[in-house]
Image: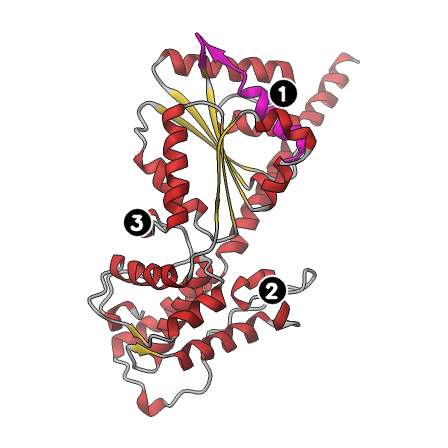
Amino acid sequence: MYEAFYGLSSKPFQLSPDPNFYYGSKQHRRAKAYLDYGVLRNDGFIVITGEIGAGKTTLLRGLLDSLNRSNVVIGNVVTTQLDAEDTLRMVGAAFGVRVKDASKSELLMTLEAFFVSQVTQGKRCLLIVDEAQNLTARAVEELRMLSNFQFANQSLLQTFLVGQPEFRNILQKPEMEQFRQRVAATCHIGPLDEDETQRYMEHRLKCAGSTGKPTFDHDAFPAIHKASNGIPRRINRLCDRLLLLGFMQGRSHLTLADVKEVLRDIAQESETPQPSEANPLDGAASRPADSRPAPLDVSLGPLDLARLKLGVADVDGLSADLAALSADHNADRLQRLERSMMRLERINLQTLTLLQRLIDAVKQH
């Protein structure tokens, strides 16, 4: 809706990861260098950690887009609290290997045969494990065992582990010593500093086709950095609402007062019980664990209707854009739903296996 008002070709601050908007901060460039090094090495584990919304997924998608898919076979796994054998099954399913009704030994042999067949065709296998902080110690050990597969002194599988900061603590446990020896490189993506926050915003606006609008008061940038803690997804959420506010009030220049107004609105929508201990830009993270998510309220406080400069086309597009805003607001919730679906899939697989065993037992009698 507000894209036309600011002369933009797309939404500059969408919440979903998009490699086209990748911003190479100092830490993101360092992480990308590690990923590139890992791809060239084609061996061991590469560990990338960062806060929720720090840009890990965007970085990975950019890497994958740069790979020659004709000679790289990629398996993606989003982990949940799975035991070791189920983790192996998830790896098999990610590469399209038959895992149903296979014992652990059969599964390992099938995976090894698959990896060997890819190498003999001049291809390489790359496993990407997202949400790695959910891996159990036994699951990590199974992944380490997979890295033992070799063919003619060539590793058959390389693994990228991507997770939240707590995964770094998991790796420091004494029982992780053997795994740590297989880690080729590790990198943590921290928050943007104040200057990078401003450059990040300007970069995304330029990628969205900005030719000078919107503009910001100089003191708006420090306030945005402080409120977002320099986390890109939080910056996106705040700036998206900020641009919506400017559009609704017919202004393309945004001030510190506008930033404060949007922060008040977000805090009220999140129903934060203790604002001093939670960041309102974290959305679901700032709500009590046992509460239902608050419905999205896109009201921006009292407006002077006489100052609104909305054409018929703008009014017609309002409903559709608000719906898109609601979808962005629930992006994290959808990701959690996807992980829940994966758990249900595992339960269904176990249920089918038990039913097959019952049928076989009945046939024997």
Circles 1, 2 touching at the beta carbon (< 8 Å): no
Q: Amino acid at mark 1?
A: Asp
Front in this rendered view, residue 353 or 127: 127
Residue at the (26%, 74%) spot, across then down = 313
Q: Residues within 10 Å of mark 2 (few under 14, many from 20)?
A: some
User: Horizontal and vertical percent for residue 288?
Assistant: 67, 64
Please name the residue that numbered disc 3 is placed on: 20
Q: Which mark is residue 1?
A: none
- Which one is in front in this view, the residue at disc 1 or the one at disc 3? 3
Classify mark 1: helix, strand or loop.
loop
Question: Compared to 15, does 45 lie above or below?
Answer: above
Q: Earlier in the sequence, mark 3 or mark 2?
A: 3
Residue 140 lies in the magenta-colored region: yes
Please name the residue that numbered disc 1 is placed on: 101
**Which residues lie in the magenta part?**
135-154
User: Horizontal and vertical percent for residue 108?
Assistant: 58, 16
Q: Earlier in the sequence, mark 1 or mark 3?
A: 3
Q: CA distance from mark 3 to mark 2?
A: 30 Å
Residue at the (80%, 13%) spot, across then down = 365
Q: Amino acid at mark 2?
A: Ser
User: Horizontal and vertical percent for residue 50?
Assistant: 51, 47
- Residue 271 left/right relative to 20: right
Classify mark 3: helix, strand or loop.
helix
Please name the residue that numbered disc 2 is placed on: 286
Front in this rendered view, residue 83 or 293: 83
Q: CA distance from mark 1 to mark 3?
A: 42 Å
Residue at the (24%, 61%) spot, across then down = 9
Residue 9 lies in the magenta-colored region: no
